[in-house]
Amino acid sequence: MPHDDHLAILEALPPVERRQMLESLSEQEREELPTHWRFWARPEQLAPDGEWRTWLVLAGRGFGKTRAGAEWVRSVAEGNPAARIALVGASMPEVRAVMVEGESGILAVCPLRRRPDFEPSLRRLVWPNGAQAMLYSAAEPEMLRGPQHSHAWCDEIAKWDNASARATRAWDNLLFGLRLGETPRAMATTTPRAVPLVQRLLAEPDADLVVTRGRTEDNHANLPARFVRDIRRRFGRSLLGRQELDGELIAEVDGALWPRALIEACRADAAPPLVRVIVAVDPPASAEGDACGIAVAGLSADGTGWVLADCSVRRASPERWARAVAEAAKAWGADRVVAEANQGGAMVASVLRAAEQALPLRLVHASRGKVARAEPVAALYETGRVRHAGTFPDLEDEMAGLVAGGDYQGPGRSPDRADALVWALTELMLGKMGQPRVSLA
């Protein structure tokens, strides 16, 4: 029976019958009903049958991966007093805050009378029957060299630190120690990203690996309806939305100027005070053609470039996209608008000035292709000199599709949003206005 039907049947019973059913349960059964996982779980959250060695759950955010992992650990521990379980996360604080003490973590899902004791100083959970779980950080692979385990739950493996191959070394050290009991097993839960460890696991023989996939909406019964609606409206079917919400593994484009891992590494929650703000626009050739790319970027006092907004508009008339540029400049307090003039410099200037008379405007002419213009800006990202103040799905999808020395391989016909961003950061950081000056005073 589908999991939604369990709750639906219980709620659909007349009050008298519902009360009779609940009263027929013992006190202990009523106490443990909220934690009776097989009653509440969706089928895809339950451990698969068979002789698998690794169970990989690749699913969107909010799918219920953490709950599934915590419940699997609980079932292993309660069913096997000799179980020695490794709990591995991206960092020790995350293991404790999410896997152990989180709202869907191990302590929360265990019935009170069978809840393990958590010994933070020893990084250990001990169940009443003697089963144990140890906490490890994937950022310290050597922690996993030596200890032996019968089972392992590895959370958000796509977030594990890939520097110096730490993620794969942590996994390898775990496997070397996964040798207790008759059937050692590992469960890995993660939002998919095309990192080496995830790709390696997916290449394992079918006999050893079971993959469960899912979307954010699969868990709609346990998520606020407004959250699901708003997050889908914002990210839609963008590549980031397909990855983070639909649980798709989006492969990196070979030779991309902006690999997705690089973009993620440059992300921040908010920008600091800025000394300059630029709005850059890549006008479309016609209202029926490509989008009008409009990007807002700023420069902080330490010389870091900040991507602030993607205000691009699709299928817009000249008057509409010019108004969008003027509104962006006003909203962000821009001190200059930079516009690509190749589509008719006089038209671009007149349209923008008609939208806002006082708009400071600089026209730039493209003498090189979009990819060639983007390469110096991509180098700024690689050296950590540019940050994204938030998430910009459509813009970032285009950035990830620009290939060094090759053709554009992202969504749409042309990377207009990314091109506007390139103009903005070039003006701020690579043009004369962005060059460092030496004072002789």
Image: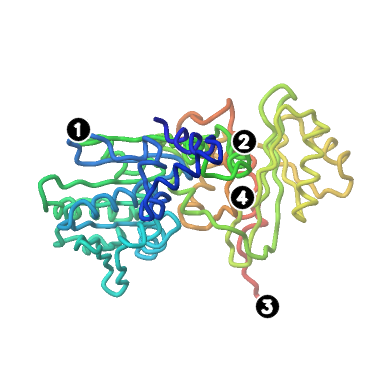
Q: Are marks 4 and 1 in contact (CB under 8 Å)?
A: no
Q: Residue at horizontal 79%, vertical 28%?
A: 317
Q: Which residue is mark 4?
A: 425
Q: Secondary structure at mark 2?
A: loop
Q: Secondary structure at mark 1?
A: loop
Along the line of sight, the residue nearer the viewer: 270 or 358: 270
User: Residue beneath label 1, please?
Assistant: 205
Q: Nearer the viewer, mark 1 or mark 3?
A: 1
Residue 160 left/right relative to 266: left
Q: Picture coordinates of residue 441 (x, y %)?
A: 68, 78
User: Which circle's residue, 2 or 3, is located before the other in the chain?
Assistant: 2
Q: CA distance from mark 4 to mark 2?
A: 17 Å
- Viewer-nearest residue: 439 or 335: 335
Which numbered mark, 4 or 1, is in the foreground of this view? 1
Which residue extends farthest top?
A: 288
Q: Quadrant of residue 226?
A: top right
Q: Position of residue 367 (x, y in %)?
A: 62, 35
Task: Report crowding for label 2: few under 14, some 14 to 19, many 20 or more residues within 10 A (C-alpha).
Answer: few
User: What's the residue type where badge 1 is placed?
Assistant: Pro
Mark 3 lies on residue: 441
| Amino acid type of the residue tagged 3 in the rendering | Ala
Residue at x 35%, y 42% (from the top left corner): 38
User: Any mark on residue 367, and which?
Assistant: 2
Q: Earlier in the sequence, mark 3 or mark 4?
A: 4
Q: From this viewpoint, is residue 339 visible?
A: yes
**Quarter location, residue 141:** bottom left
Q: CA distance from mark 3 to mark 4?
A: 29 Å
C-alpha span from label 1 to label 3: 69 Å
